[in-house]
Each structure stands twice: as structure tokens, then as C-alpha cells.
Amino acid sequence: MKKLALFLLPLGLCLAVGFIPGSSSSPSAATRMWNESYMVWRLSLEAMHTTVDQAASTESVEKLELAYVRSRAAFKRIEFLMVYLDPEAHKDYINGAPLLHLERKAPDLVILEPKGYQPLDELLYGEAPLEALKEMEKLIGEMEAMGERMGKGKGVIRDFQLFEASRNGLVSLFTLGLTGFDTPSSGLAMADARNSWGGMRDFMATFQDRIRSRDAALADRIERTWAEGDQVLGEAYDFDQFDRLHFLRTYLNPLYRDLLEAQNLLGIELPHEVNPLPRATNYSSTNLFAEDYLNPWFFSKLPANQQVTERTELGKLLFFDPVLSEATDMACATCHHPQQGFAEAKPKSLARGGQGTIQRNSMGLVNAVYANRYFHDLRTEQLKKQVAHVVFNTQEFNTSFTAIEARLNRSPEYLDLFRAAFPRHTRRPINEHTIATALAYYVQSLRGFDSPFDRYVRGETNEMSADVQRGFNLFMGKAACGTCHFAPTFNGNVPPAFNDTESEVLGVPVDHHARSLNLDPDRGRYDNQRPKERAPFYQHSFKTPTVRNIALTGPYMHNGAYATLDDVIDFYDRGGGQGMGLDLDNQTLPPDALELEEQEKKDLVAFMESLTDTTGMTSIPAQLPRFPDRPEWNQRDWRRNY
């Protein structure tokens, strides 16, 4: 009873007991706060477990819902640190998506059941919670066991950990929390945001005296932003109406910047000074939508200090050169047009010689580097390995690297370019590795975070049409687009680590105009030739692409089934294939209708169109390298001649 009584104290008092903002600058203050807050969370799990047992006898879930809400609140106040300290335990046992998933480190196919708050959320707020009490009890018990295990590893919380965890926590709050990503049924997203913000605020308050002693203006600014953001979230109870764009520009991005300034001011180590391993994000970036927020070298796995300009320029020539294909009639650019966001305005690109089409729609390549898996079916993990799939494909280049190497060696210009780009390859400068690497450098260079929307969010301009602003808030809120197309890339890269690229089962039909709908037979990720991923729930699962430059890259979906953005939004509004009547029990898109109004649909299109940016990327080589002994090749053109 003593433990339960402690838990039943008013939650805010219980979590913040002994910690008055700005009262201490001692490193031990944050550690004490962490240990006590962690214990409050553990006790909340015990209380929830007890309440499940009571619900079984009373056949009432009201008290269980209250216990769940309290436990979520305790968890959300420290989640930013839990994610930082043990991201895998957090994802697999505490707050993972309510979907079957794979054991990452297993040598073979191992399927794991979802665990933690999200599946619990679905059960408790589902249609028959009383019938799911045993499942709930099991989930809570597993969370308790993991909480105990994680608790044994707790120790001193270092200053640099708090700063990094808090800045990551701000990113998570905005990209996951405020989108409703982890509240699939309860609708507790706004309460979660308030608790997450408040938890980070209380922990970071332990630095306020130290900051104030060195820069009073910075300390005032940070304190004011925390307080005003707290007030805005405290007054926000309507998920659909919350102005996320205002919150991002006015509170979250400024605080993200100021915490970095405070960390530098106090001389607290930066992440790369503690651990030199590359990261997906650039910690020194000051804005979630900054051009340098993400680190392209982390994703591409290419050397960042070896003839970057020479390799990129060489890759550009190769990208537009049809000499790489067997019949010298197809280049990379043939299916990835610069003026079309490096996609192609066809449902599926023509195969070589105009004989039929390739299997899927050509994806846009701008910002394609920001992923850890590539192709619609996520078949490869390295940017440079994409090339081989095109070279050997009988519908595309239909050749080999040996044949390409022999051809390129016949051009003195190419030979000189390869020698300059790869000076260490003195014996064979032209080979499979250097060809694929040069192309990867060029694709990596196709990056654009300077769209009208980006400039507005960064505060470089204050002009943005009302429909775009409404569209962004819809995208990140009511329309639920942001729960799969995560900001700032607006693709399937999951924040805040951005090291996991998701795929989704949407139920895309062959022809959405048909009177009788049929599911597209393409099984996607299930057939990507990776035995470890041949799981039933990956049937018809496809990579979540970016919506940046989406105004240029239609038609849409893996099969090009939707010609316009209006068509795409209507598909989602109706709940995907399952919502439209297709039998698809593994669909990951909720089948419920969004019930968007016509103006809301127009606003969504306006927002997505504001993400267009191909600045400096669309130039075409004035001339390709020449082949003195094959004059007919010197007339080659990457544009289709059939």
C-alpha cells in the first residue's frame, strides 16, 4: 500500500518532488531526478498491473484507463532519456509500434510480437477491452520486467547525455508525439506532448544557474521558451486544431538552437567529442529543417574526404551516359529525368528497346540518399550497390561491369577522369567499384532542403500562404501523413536516430478506376530476395518515399496507379485498399476513413507542392566523353529514341 500511495500523489508533484527549476546546478541533481522519476514510472506499471486484475472482477475499465493515463504520463516525462540510454529496449519492449516486426540481430527470420504502450493502447481503447485483459496483463508484465532490467543499468547521468537526449527529445516530440504516432487509439497525443515537454524542462532546469552565471540573456530566453511552450501545450486539447507550425517556429526550433548554445557556453562535450562514430544528424545544426541537419555521409557510407568534386562530376557524366547499357540506348537519366525530380512521368518506365515496362515506377532521386535501405522493396543497404541491380537487369542495362569497363577504357577522356577521381587505383582506375562509387557520389549530391516551406520554417522569410500553413498542420495532425512520412525528410526514416527506413502495406490496387478493385499482385518487400525478411506481414509492403518534390514526381505509388496528388489523397482519405473493400489483413495503414473536407485536401496538396526544391541539380552535361574509335557512340543520347 505504501508504494501505491506514493503513486497516487498528484503526478506533477510526484515527478518533480525536490526539484525546483533553477534550484541546483549540481550534476547529481539530474541523476537524483532520473532515479526518482524512473521509480515513479516503475510504480505506475505496478499500479496498472493491479488495476488490470481488479478490472477482471469488476468488469470495468474506467480505473484501468486512469491507471494507464497516469503511467503514460510518468513514462513520457522520462522517455527522452530512456530512448537515449537504451533505444533497442525502448523500441522492442516499451513503446514500439503495434505491428509484428523482425529480430534485427537474428541470423534467420525471427518474428517478434509488438510490446509496450502502443499495443496496450490499441487493446485498452479498442472495441472489446474486457476481452483483452489477459493480453494487457502480459504486456504490462513484460514492461515491468524490462523496466527492472533497464533500471539495473542506471547510473550517473552526465551533462552531455542530458543535453543530447533533450535535443533529440525535442525532435521526437514534434515528429512523433505531436503527430499521434504512438497513440493509435487513445488520442492522448496532446497530453503526451505536455508531459514530454515538462519532463525535459524540469531536467534541463538543473543547468539554469550555471547558464545564468555566464549569459543571463540566454538563460532568460531558454526559461521563457520553456514556460511559454508549456503554456501553449497546456492549453491545447484539440489534436486536430493545434497549430504545429507555430509551435515549431516559435518554441521548438529556437529552443533546439539555444540548448546547443548553452552546451557550448558551459563547455560541455559534444557528441562527436565523446563518440567519434558517424551519426545521421549533424549535432551542430541549429534547426530541424536546416540544410545541414542530416549527415548525407552517414547514409551513403562514402568517404567524405577523397576527391569529392572529381567523383561527383564523373558520376554525373556516367549518370547521363547510355554507353553503360548494352545497346547504348539507356542511361540512368533515361528513367530519372532532372526536370521531373529525377523520376519519370510514366506509371512504369519503358524497358530497354521499348519492349514492355520495368516492374515498378521510377522513384525520384532528390534526397534519396537519406535512407538506410534503397529501392521500393528495400533490397539493398548501400547507395552504390543500387547500380548493380540496374546493370544486370535484363529489362534495363542488360550488361555487366566487365563489359562497361572495357567500353569506358576506350575513351581517353574517361580514363583521365577516373584517374583524377580515384588516384589510388593506379593499375585499374576503371572498375566495378569506381564506376558504382562515382555514380553514388552524384546521387548523393542531389539534395534539396531549400524549398519555400524550409525557408519559412527556418525564419528566413515570414511569407507563407495560409493554405500551405493549414496543409502542414493537417499533414502532421488530422490527416496522419506525418506518422509515416516523418519530418524533416518526409520519408520513412524514423526520428530521432533516422537510422531505420520503414515500409508500409497500403493496399494499392491495380486500377483504382475499375468498378471491381483488384490488389496489385506485386508483393514488394516480401520478394526482395532477402530470406531474413520473407515474413508474411511484408507481403505488398513498399518503402515509404519522400514527399519532397512530389509535385514533380508523379504518377504515384510503386505501380504508378495514381496520376495526381488529388487521387493519392483520396486513396488515403478512404483508408487505403482495405478501406476501399480489398481483403488485406496485413495492411499497416489504418482502414478508417479520415473524413477530410475538400478544402483540407486542397490544403494538403498546397503544402506538398511547397516542398519543391531542385536548385542547382537539373543541369545536363553539355557533352559526354568521346570515343575516337567508335564514332557512332559519339552521337549517343540519354533521351529515349523509341
Image (cartoon, rainbow, N blue to C red):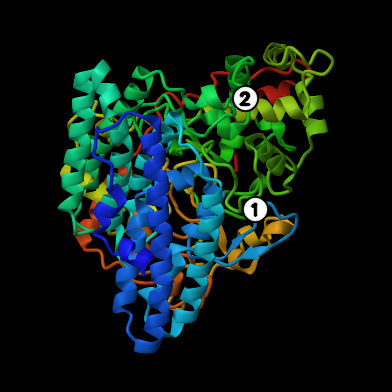
Mark toward the start of the polypeptide (1 vs 2): 1
Q: Which mark is residue 114?
A: none
Q: 204 above or below 528?
A: above
Q: 600 above or below 612?
A: below
Question: Which type of secondary structure does the marked residue at label 1 adopt?
Answer: loop
Q: Amino acid at mark 1?
A: Arg
Q: Quadrant of the N terminus?
A: bottom left
- Residue 256 image position (x, y, % from top left): 32, 32
Crowding at mark 1 (Cα within 10 Å: few <14, some 14-19, many 20+): few
Left or right, 139 with reference to 330: left
Residue 123 visible here? no
Name the residue: 67% across, 15% down: 421
Q: Amino acid at mark 2?
A: Gly
Q: Which mark is residue 104?
A: 1
Tag 1 near tag 2, CB within 8 Å: no
Q: Residue furthest right?
A: 427
Q: Nearer the viewer, mark 1 or mark 2?
A: 1
Nearer-the-camera pick, 483 or 543? 483
Q: How many numbered marks appear?
A: 2
Q: 95 above or below 155?
A: below
Badge 2 is on which residue? Answer: 315
Nearer-the-camera pick, 354 or 158? 158
- Residue 23 image position (x, y, % from top left): 25, 33
Q: 142 above or below 29?
A: below
Name the residue: 77% across, 39% down: 399
Identify the image quadrant of residue 208: top left
Question: Which type of secondary structure does the marked residue at label 2 adopt?
Answer: helix
Q: CA distance from mark 1 to mark 2?
A: 33 Å
- Residue 324 image position (x, y, % from top left): 71, 32
